[in-house]
Image: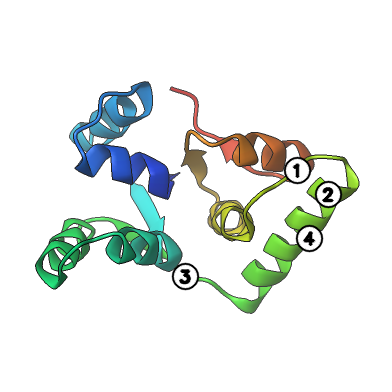
Amino acid sequence: MILVDTGIWIDFFANRDSPEVDELIRLIENGEEIFYTGVILQELAQGCSSAKQAALIEEHFVPFSEVFVQRSTYLLAAKVFRDGRAKGYPIRSSIDCLIAACAIEAGCSLLQDDRDYDFISRVSRLKLHKK
């Protein structure tokens, strides 16, 4: 069970070469259970230049499982942010805290390439996917 962060999907759709994209392709080809959240889908769709492009993105996610945000998820995300700040880790994005909280609650590891998640994993139960 792997939740894939927005940045990895952006690189995937742009055909950028990176170890994380290679890992995502490997996971898909091996039939691993891939997860996403609504906020990841939102970030991808808002970056599209047309409704047609956004529809293609949405269609791409049909075979994957969505992690739904609950009240507890928002509260965990806020705690992660506060805990990071208290330990001196400069977490730049509350959205990253929300995505991390989704991964934690769903029991997923997170495939990512963002220093915020390294900090988040130090102050929470977030498991980072190892390539």
Disc 3/disc 2 C-alpha distance (Å): 26 Å
Quadrant containing the N terminus in the rendered view: top left
Assign a secondary structure to mark 4.
helix
Disc 2/disc 1 C-alpha distance (Å): 6 Å
Q: Residue at x 28, y 64 (%)?
A: 45
Quadrant containing the C terminus in the rendered view: top left
Can you identify the residue that label 4 sits on?
A: 79
**In the image, is 52 to the left or to the right of 45?**
left
Can you identify the residue that label 1 sits on?
A: 90
From the image, state whether disc 1 or disc 4 is nearer to you: 1
Can you identify the residue that label 2 sits on?
A: 85
Q: Local crowd at mark 1 within 10 Å, few (<14), some, or many (≥20)?
A: some
Is 23 located above or below residue 80 in the figure?
A: above
Check disc 1 and give the amino acid type. Answer: Pro
**Which label belongs to residue 68?**
3
Q: Residue at x 63, y 68 (%)?
A: 73
Disc on the earlier residue, 2 or 1: 2
Disc on the earlier residue, 3 or 2: 3
Disc on the earlier residue, 2 or 4: 4
**In the image, is 27 to the left or to the right of 113?**
left
Disc 1/disc 3 C-alpha distance (Å): 26 Å
From the image, state whether disc 3 or disc 4 is nearer to you: 4
Q: How is the image coloured?
A: rainbow
Q: Do callouts 2 and 1 mark residues in contact (Cβ within 8 Å)?
A: yes
Q: Position of residue 13 (x, y in %)?
A: 21, 43
